[in-house]
Image (cartoon, rainbow, N blue to C red):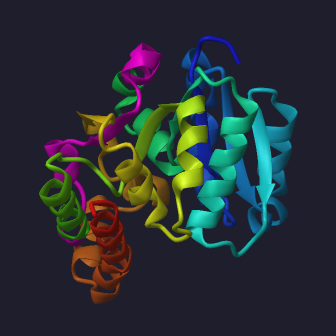
Amino acid sequence: MGVKPVLVLPFNDAQGIVWRSFKPIVPQLKQVLAAVLVGVPADTAQGQPALMAAMRADPFFAVLETPAGQLAGEYFLALYEWAARVCPPGQVLHLAFPDRVAFALGGGFGEAFLEDVSSLRAEDTPLLFARSEAAWATHPANYRQAEAMITAAGEMLFGKRLDFAWCHLAIQAGRLASLLPTLTRRDMSLLAEMVAGLVDEVQMHEVDWLAWEDPFILEVDGAALKAEREGSAAQSRHRLRYAVPMMEVLLDRAV
């Protein structure tokens, strides 16, 4: 795959909403990446034939089709195991999410994103790209409140401030390969378990390009959507449903 890094994305997009914003930024990705490895669930593959055709026709993409209906952690684990297997041990992998990447490049942060990705050295991994204060300020307050509890729990238990509900983790393929067999969770808390397994070595770099992506992806007014999400008890419950298991993971790992 060469010296350039590789992007690894869970592309769960049965409605094609993310692909609409992701497709235009592919030429920019080709400037700094060797490849994009995507995990596509069966329902996305079946429902979005144009997406699948575009990826299969472009050697820049490699596609792993996964079963529909998997738990989030099962899906992530299958994708990350495959990426670690097909890449050389020293290959830098950027584990990220396609909506976040599409927003970073299409929403006004392209130069900073490309610089951060292209300038990262293998010896500086594992590295979490985390939301800066400016990035967090764009998110609904209930999102931040839920995830702040996870961060605070991790700091109490490990003495280190980290984003356990992460959006972007850079790691060498060999280190990822050795980490994955230690993981036991199969829901969203797998993400926190990964960082807990790297806690003694992982560092964190806060970036503005992890500002809230939903208004850009959904093509709606950001202020209105933010107010709607902040006033939604269902949204608050959704955030807590992954925050609480993540804190349980950290408590278990700190023993």
Which image quadrant for residue 253? bottom left
Pick whichever, 181 or 137, lies toward us.
Answer: 181
Which image quadrant for residue 103? top left
Does residue 133 appear to the left or right of 236 in the view shown? left
Judge whether residue 12 can be spotted in this image: no
Q: Residue at x 84, y 56 (%)?
A: 49
The quarter of the image holding the C terminus is bottom left
Can you name the residue that lies furthest to the front here? 255
Judge whether residue 107 can be spotted in this image: yes
The quarter of the image holding the N terminus is top right
Q: Residue at x 81, y 30 (%)?
A: 58
Please say whether residue 153 is one of the residues in the magenta stretch: no
Can you name the residue that lies furthest to the bottom here? 233
Pick whichever, 238 or 208, lies toward us.
Answer: 238
Measuring from the top left, give residue 240's x and y in whole percent. Answer: 30, 78
Measuring from the top left, give residue 157's x and y in whole percent. Answer: 18, 59
Does residue 219 appear to the left or right of 149 in the view shown? right
- Seen in the picture, residue 45 relative to 69 is either above or below; the reply is above
Which image quadrant for residue 38? top right
Please say whether residue 128 is one of the residues in the magenta stretch: yes
Q: How many marks?
A: 0
Q: Residue at x 81, y 59 (%)?
A: 45
Highlighted magenta segment, given as a residue range? 114-142
Measuring from the top left, give residue 114's x and y in whole percent. Answer: 44, 22
Q: Residue at x 17, y 68 (%)?
A: 145
Does residue 38 appear to the left or right of 157 in the view shown? right
Measuring from the top left, give residue 119's x and y in whole percent. Answer: 40, 14
- Seen in the picture, residue 210 relative to 252 is either above or below; the reply is above
